[in-house]
Image (cartoon, helix red, strand yellow):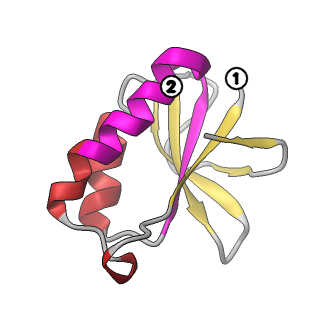
Amino acid sequence: MKKIMVEVVIKKNGGIIAVDDLEKLKGKILYYIEKSIGWNNIFILSGRLPVWAYSYLTHVLHPAKVVGCFEPRSNCAIIVMSHAPEVREGMTITIEDTENL
């Protein structure tokens, strides 16, 4: 499994995401995953987003093998969802060798 960083940067509205932006964001993420990356990877969410946006994106990424959230204080990712027996929720993984979405 590759580690893929999903870095979300909101460029409009002073960097504040609106609920109406979620569907477009979902479309962009799904396009890249389904066209070139595939679901059998570890996806690490990162970016300045409210909790509800992270929850939504975790739901969008549910078909993925593993989903984690970047933890900048420890420079690692914390696993929040896993369909891989070797990776458990709550584990931390390094972000070394991570590719960008």
- Residue at which label 1 appears: 1
- Residue at which label 2 appears: 33
Q: Disc 2 or 1, which lies upstream in sequence?
A: 1
Compared with 55, 67 (above or below) is above
The question of residue 44 being in magenta is answered with yes
**Relative to 58, 99 lies left or right:** right
Please state the extent of the stretch shown in magenta in the rendering: 24-47
* Kind of residue sitting beneath label 2: Ile
Residue 40 visible in image: no
- Asked where in the image residue 62 lies, by quadrant, the reply is top left
If the image is split into quadrants, where does the C terminus sit? top right
If the image is split into quadrants, where does the N terminus sit? top right
**Relative to 95, 5 lies left or right:** left
Between residue 81 and residue 25, name the one nearer to us. Answer: 25
* Kind of residue sitting beneath label 1: Met
Between residue 97 and residue 92, name the one nearer to us. Answer: 97
Disc 2 versus disc 1: distance between alpha carbons?
14 Å
- Asked where in the image residue 51 lies, by quadrant, the reply is bottom left
Between residue 22 and residue 83, name the one nearer to us. Answer: 22
